Amino acid sequence: MADSRGTPDTRTSLQVENLGKRVPLPSGDLTILDGVGFTIQQGEAVAIVGASGSGKSTLLSLMAGLDTPSVGEVRLDGSALSGLDEDGRAKIRGEKVGFVFQSFQLLPSLTALENVMLPLELRGDADAEGPARSMLGQVGLAERLGHYPRQLSGGEQQRVALARAFVTRPAVLFADEPTGNLDTRTGQAIIELLFRMNRESGTTLVLVTHDEALAARCGRQLRLDSGRLVAA
């Protein structure tokens, strides 16, 4: 599709401009990220790769507005995060962002259904249960709605986490080592589910991973080395 000038109708989902993160130490500043910049279009699947300590998780936190940079800017679905306070960034996250973590991050006192309903309730949706039930059905857990995390396997818990991440229909989903705590077979099933839901929803997917096979499934890889972007 093109606009009236014949320009392709592409939409920027994430724009990272000259991003830097430094942490003060008694011996001097520690540079975690330095001059990182790139653009991700809506619906892309992008992997952030690199050795441990290269700055991958810090970059993810900055892109999601969970942390603030020392220098540079992140624009998330058109919103400049630097101009927002913590409440403003939290509002953007609630409206536009989903998360999947290595450690699942489910609330142990809530059932699978209640865990998936939670972000909709926090957003103020009038109906949280209907979409949550539907999303849990899509990840194959329609029979496990009333189970607590301790009653679910690791793979089932990650499926609940995926349902919770996608239920708000986020513009961007950030996944930090989403298969890191799963065995190979279960991890592969989660990967297939993650990419299927990405394709069906059009959500931009940004993955931090050590898994080169998982990274290769993405349309593009951003490689960090000692806080600098060395390949895209």
Image: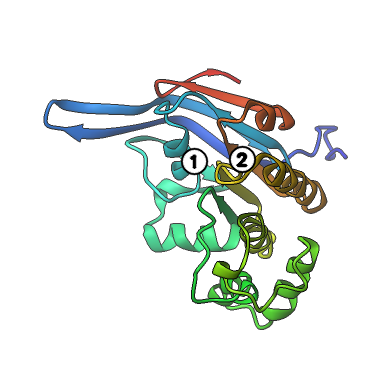
Q: Residue at x 80, y 32 (%)?
A: 7
Name the quarter where the N terminus is drawn: top right
Which residue in the protein does label 1 denote? 60
The mark total stands at: 2
Label 2's element?
strand
Q: Which residue is drawn at 61% across and 30% down?
A: 211
Q: Can residue 77 be seen in this view?
A: no
Residue furthest bottom as drawn = 126
Q: Residue at x 70, y 37 (%)?
A: 45
**Coordinates of residue 100 in the picture (x, y in percent):** 58, 52
**Coordinates of residue 160 in the picture (x, y in percent):** 65, 63
**Coordinates of residue 112 in the picture (x, y in percent):** 63, 72
**Coordinates of residue 6 in the picture (x, y in percent):** 85, 32
Name the quarter where the C terminus is drawn: top right
Marks 2 and 1: in contact by CB < 8 Å? Answer: yes
Label 1's element?
helix
| Mark identifier at residue 206 | 2
Q: Is residue 218 above or below residue 88?
A: above
Question: Circle 2: is it few (<14), some (14-19), or many (20+) Cα within 10 Å?
Answer: many
- Identify the amino acid type marked 1: Leu
- Identify the amino acid type marked 2: Val
Apparent side of residue 79 relative to residue 11 in the rendered image (left or right): left
Q: Which residue is drawn at 80% across and 46% down?
A: 199
Q: Can residue 221 be seen in this view?
A: yes
